[in-house]
Every structure is written in C-alpha cells, then in structure tokens.
Amino acid sequence: MTAVEKPALNPVLTVGGNDAELTERLENELDDFNDAATGHLPHDEFSVKATDDDGGLIGGLTAWTWGGLCGIELLWVREESRADGWGAKLLLAGEAEAVRRGCDRVMVSSYTFQAPGFYQRHGYTEVGRVPGVPGGHADVYLFKVLGEG
C-alpha cells in the first residue's frame, strides 16, 4: 500500500427516521466548517415571545445571528390575534434585537401561502424563489438591510 492509498472501511449507508444525534453532529461539523471559512464570526440564537394575561401564547419569533446577519427561522401569531398587529410587533422587536446584537441585515423565507407580503410591507425585498412546494406554491426568500425602513 502506498502513502496515498487508504484501507477499505466497508462503509455502511443507512436510511431512517429522525436521528437527533446525527443532526447535532452535522450541525457541529458544518458550524466548524463555516467558522473556518468565514473567520469564526460570532453566532447565536434568540427569541421573542408575546403572551396574554393568562400566560397563553399570542405569538413568537425565533432567529439566529451570525457575523452581522440575522436569520428569522420562525414567526407565528395565533389566528385570533393576527389583526391586532402582533406580527409586526414581534418582527420589529426581533429586528431591534438583531441590531442590538450587531446585525445590519436580516433574511427570512416564507411560503407563498404564508406571509411574503407581510415581510414586503415591512421593507423586505424578494431575492429568490424556489418552486415545487406542495399545492403549487413556492418558498420565497426575502432580505432587508436594517436601518433602511
């Protein structure tokens, strides 16, 4: 065997359901790779939550920050509270927290049957669209420079 040859490892390929251990390992490996490629920029996660007087969930937002970029992962408001402006309140609070954490831009994706128009009304610009979502829909990617409206 030469120096460049490697012994056969008899690899095994498995397909299964949810594998939390695999997910965590992949996230860690990709984080390490991304950190090396981008100069180990700081990343973190945060949330914004609104509750009513009884402690019931009105809505919430989860997001991550990484090197000046904020990514909104989830934003949801219960149906009976949507007309009360809670989506905007959660979004604005999330953007303010992103700025506090040093972000100057934010991204989000939303299916066409969800809320791309909501984000556009709040200054987000569509930057991409992936077709093929069930029901004839698409996944819309939106971007906003924070501090520009």
Image (tube, rainbow, N blue to C red):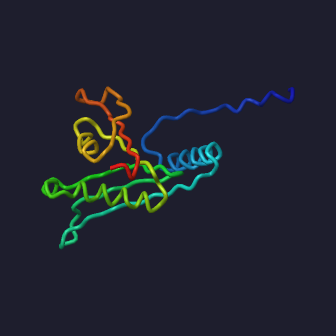
Residue 19 location (% of width, % of height):
47, 46
Q: Report the front residue among 19 and 74.
A: 74
Q: Position of residue 124 (x, y in %)?
A: 33, 43
Task: Compare residues 81 and 125 and report the one nearer the observer.
Answer: 125
At 57% from the left edge and 44% from the top edge, which residue is drawn? Answer: 30
Q: Relative to 42, does residue 7 appear above or below in the rendering?
A: above
Q: Give residue 135's position: percent from left, percent from top.
A: 22, 29
Residue 44, placed above or below residue 6? below
Quarter holding the N terminus is top right
| In the image, residue 145 above or below residue 15 | below
Q: Name which residue lies at 23% across and 40% down.
A: 117
Which image quadrant for residue 4? top right
- Residue located 56% across and 56% down the image: 42
Query: Does 97 sit left or right of 32 as displayed?
Result: left
Q: For the image shown, how many numbered marks are present on the structure?
A: 0
Residue 114 is left or right of residue 145, and the answer is left
Residue in the image at 59% along x and 44% along y: 34
In percent of width and height, residue 57 lies at 23, 63
Tell which residue pokes out farthest to the front in this image: 148
Q: Is residue 11 above or below residue 101?
A: above
Foreground residue among 40 and 51:
40
Q: Residue furthest right?
A: 2
Q: Quadrant of residue 119?
A: top left
